[in-house]
């Protein structure tokens, strides 16, 4: 006797499906897909190109959305070590390895979009990051992500200079919208 309840394979299991509001913009939709790709890459040894292609195809993403997903994912992967170091500085209560995989990737992606791509405002970045945490994270994810991002934006100029280099992708004015 282990103290655990007995389970019968024939028992009826109740499943609750949670419906989330659809994304309001093409970018919001792309962020959701990018987060799913980053999550999978963070907890498996799958190849980035294969995961990107599979998620973009499965979600029936249009060309512009697919490009934004790719830019986010590949950019985060390129800057991952530096992004993680910054997260360590601003989320001092938790070792990065103990931060939930979903929260870690929301922070990476939001920081990359805000500080490297510079295609969104601070408010939009924080709203999108906390929105993703609310949808995909735990009960405490939204507050955690909001707190870390809130501390980071106080040093936005310094962090942007640290993250941006000459090898980064240039974005035209058409791509600089929320």
Image (cartoon, rainbow, N blue to C red):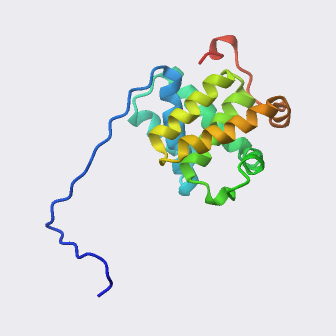
Q: Is residue 55 left or right of residue 79?
A: left
At x 40%, y 33%, the residue is: 59
Report the label total.
Answer: 0
Q: Position of residue 141 (x, y in %)?
A: 54, 45
Work out whether 2 lies above or below 25: below
Query: Which image quadrant: the N terminus?
Result: bottom left
| Residue drawn at x 75%, y 37% as measured from the top left | 152
Residue at image coords 48%, 19%? 25
Instruction: From the top left corner, tell me how far across and down residue 57 is, in percent.
Output: 42, 34
Quadrant housing residue 115: top right
Residue found 51% across the figure and 50% down from its top: 40
Q: In which quarter of the image is the C terminus?
A: top right
In the rendered structure, the answer to whether residue 159 lies left or right of residue 64 reads: right
Near-viewer residue (108 or 100): 100
Where residue 18 appears, as percent x and y from the top left, is 32, 40
Q: Quick one: 55 or 42, which is closer to the camera?
A: 42
Q: Where residue 3 appears, x then y in whole percent?
A: 32, 82
């Amino acid at each position: 006797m282990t103290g655990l309840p007995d389970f019968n394979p024939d028992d009826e299991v109740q499943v609750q499906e949670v419906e989330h509001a659809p994304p309001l913009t093409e970018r919001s939709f792309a962020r959701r897909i990018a987060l799913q790709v980053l999550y999978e890459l963070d907890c498996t040894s799958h190849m980035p190109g294969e995961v990107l292609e599979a998620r973009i195809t499965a979600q029936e993403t249009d060309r512009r959305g697919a490009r934004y997903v790719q830019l986010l994912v590949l950019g985060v992967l390129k800057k991952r070590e530096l992004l993680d170091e910054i997260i360590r500085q601003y989320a001092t209560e938790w070792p990065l390895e103990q931060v939930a995989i979903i929260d870690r990737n929301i922070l990476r992606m939001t920081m990359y979009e805000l500080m490297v791509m510079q295609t969104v405002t601070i408010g939009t970045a924080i709203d999108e990051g906390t929105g993703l945490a609310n949808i995909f994270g735990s009960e405490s994810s939204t507050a955690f992500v909001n707190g870390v991002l809130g501390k980071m934006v106080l040093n936005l100029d310094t962090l942007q200079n640290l993250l941006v280099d000459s090898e980064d992708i240039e974005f035209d004015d058409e791509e600089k919208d929320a």
